[in-house]
Image (cartoon, rainbow, N blue to C red):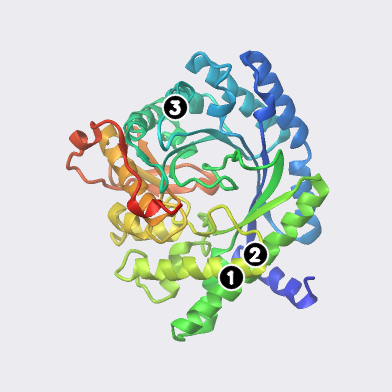
């Protein structure tokens, strides 16, 4: 039970430190929608999503109003569409027909985003996988609310470098087709290593095949709360710092647990996991970079940043696990550039580069996220960035991801505006030396020796 002092403390965190439930995400299995006729498949998909999630938005709004807890997004994730569409799709146009159905369903039920236009290709691509990946530029340029993710590697299987090479071109084509909106199509596409089945956050959410028919996953966020707690704790030693973060993460997770249980009960859907991720927003004071600076760094990106982020990530997880028996998804600290004003300020000050961000991804919860790069960046360079990040995830047995936006017509020093929670971003420079001959090689990078644990 949550007592009155916890309620008062939670209200203070909401009012003064931007605490929110970032998302209630309903996962929906589409495996029972499979049909060899693409029109029938689309009809099945639309009917199931609009039936299962018809009350999702209203339920979120009711809980928010009754408990006074901001719930920013209501989302849906579905079974990876490459699996669902394999029996019916004969061309990329068939996959585009499916994503338009998903987009139509998302608009009908009033959600913010729908994830799952995805393929899992860490060991190789089926014809259906390849077809879906080839359809991504058109699919994301002709829809609004659907997000796409491709898992190209894992610790158990290695990295599919054929998919990595292919995706460099796919990202550039997506940027070009959405050039009139600052290449926003790339914002809805993320490349993963070790992608989790139960992630409620976009753009990487999909409903894993190990999940039940429907499930409720909740993502909680509170960078501002953690920052304030650290500031109020004073200049204690690392033990004091760790305890402060851990206790704060516990309190934040308790809020998520309350919302998750209520949503699951009202929607008659099983509760899945709480994803305790310090996901920032462009709002002042809601920044992971600010947390790192409150620990004693002049700027995020200064020497010591990776150590500070490792400490933060670990204590967030430890606090969250104490508050809920079912913590999953990504859980930890996100470091997206465009969505974090502190990160943007550090880039503009020259303290933060892509290379430093890559080092930080070794200890954060995701990877290179929401990074705008020059529109004339080559496909092989983008593939090289993806390969580097996938290798970090594979070797370190963690989830890593890449969401880069080569902004068509923009160069280093320009700024792009995505709006809302997506924020704005400075265009960052990338290494100009070529990796084309390396990326041109075919096949897989094999799994590391420590993956063999059976």
Secondary structure category for the residue under label 3: helix
Seen in the image, is 377 located left or right of residue 256?
left
Secondary structure category for the residue under label 1: helix
Residue 232 sits in which quadrant?
bottom right
Q: Is residue 299 visible?
A: no
Q: Earlier in the sequence, mark 3 or mark 1?
A: 3
**Residue ID at (74%, 42%):** 57
**Residue ID at (57%, 45%):** 197
Distance (Cα) linking label 3 and label 2: 36 Å
The residue closer to the viewer here, 245 or 20, is 245
Q: Position of residue 71 (x, y in %)?
A: 68, 53
Secondary structure category for the residue under label 2: helix
Q: According to the image, label 2 marks what residue? A: 253
User: Could you tell me if the residues under marks 2 and 1 are in contact, i.e. CB atoms within 8 Å?
Assistant: yes
User: Could you tell me if the residues under marks 3 and 1 are in contact, i.e. CB atoms within 8 Å?
Assistant: no
Q: Residues within 10 Å of mark 2 (few under 14, many from 20)?
A: many
Residue 129's place in the image compared with 385, above or below, is above
Seen in the image, is 105 located left or right of residue 276?
right
Seen in the image, is 39 located left or right of residue 440?
right
Residue 408 sits in which quadrant?
top left
Q: Position of residue 437 (x, y in %)?
A: 18, 34
Q: According to the image, label 1 marks what residue? A: 319
Q: Is residue 205 visible?
A: yes
Say the numbered circle drawn on residue 133. Answer: 3
Q: Earlier in the sequence, mark 3 or mark 2?
A: 3
Q: Residues within 10 Å of mark 1 (few under 14, many from 20)?
A: many
């Amino acid at each position: 039970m949550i007592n009155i002092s916890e309620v008062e403390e939670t209200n203070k965190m909401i009012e003064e430190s931007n605490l929110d439930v970032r998302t209630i995400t309903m996962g929906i299995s589409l495996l029972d929608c499979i049909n060899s006729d693409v029109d029938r498949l689309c009809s099945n998909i639309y009917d199931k999503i609009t039936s299962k999630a018809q009350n999702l938005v209203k339920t979120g709004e009711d809980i928010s109003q009754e408990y006074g807890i901001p719930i920013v997004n209501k989302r849906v994730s579905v079974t990876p569409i490459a699996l669902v569409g394999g029996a019916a799709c004969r061309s990329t146009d068939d996959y585009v027909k499916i994503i338009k159905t998903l987009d139509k369903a998302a608009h009908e039920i009033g959600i913010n985003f729908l994830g799952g236009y995805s393929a899992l290709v860490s060991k190789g691509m089926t014809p259906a996988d390849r077809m879906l990946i080839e359809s991504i530029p058109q699919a994301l340029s002709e829809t609004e609310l659907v997000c796409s993710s491709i898992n190209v590697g894992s610790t158990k299987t290695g990295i599919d470098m054929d998919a990595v090479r292919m995706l460099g071109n796919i990202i550039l084509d997506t940027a070009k087709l959405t050039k009139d909106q600052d290449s926003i199509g790339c914002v809805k596409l993320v490349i993963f290593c070790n992608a989790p089945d139960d992630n409620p956050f976009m753009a990487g959410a999909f409903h894993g095949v190990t999940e039940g028919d429907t499930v409720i996953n909740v993502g909680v966020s509170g960078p501002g709360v953690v920052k304030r707690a650290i500031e109020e704790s004073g200049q204690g030693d690392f033990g004091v710092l760790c305890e402060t973060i851990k206790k704060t993460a516990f309190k934040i997770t308790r809020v998520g647990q309350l919302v998750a249980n209520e949503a699951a009960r009202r929607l008659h859907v099983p509760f899945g996991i709480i994803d305790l991720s310090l996901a920032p927003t462009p709002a002042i004071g809601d920044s992971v970079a600010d947390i790192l600076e409150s620990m004693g760094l002049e700027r995020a990106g200064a020497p010591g940043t990776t150590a500070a982020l490792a400490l933060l990530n670990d204590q967030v997880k430890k606090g969250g696990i104490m508050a809920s028996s079912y913590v999953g998804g990504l859980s930890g600290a996100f470091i997206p550039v465009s969505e974090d004003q502190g990160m943007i300020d550090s880039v503009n000050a020259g303290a933060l580069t892509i290379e430093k961000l890559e080092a930080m991804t070794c200890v954060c919860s995701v990877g290179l996220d929401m990074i705008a790069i020059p529109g004339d960046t080559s496909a092989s360079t983008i593939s090289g960035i993806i390969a580097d990040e996938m290798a970090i995830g594979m070797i370190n047995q963690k989830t890593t991801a890449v969401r880069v936006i080569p902004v068509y017509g923009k160069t280093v020093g320009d700024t792009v505006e995505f709006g809302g929670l997506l924020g704005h971003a400075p265009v960052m420079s990338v290494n100009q030396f070529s990796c084309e001959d390396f990326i041109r090689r075919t096949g897989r990078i094999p799994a590391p020796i420590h993956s063999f644990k059976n």
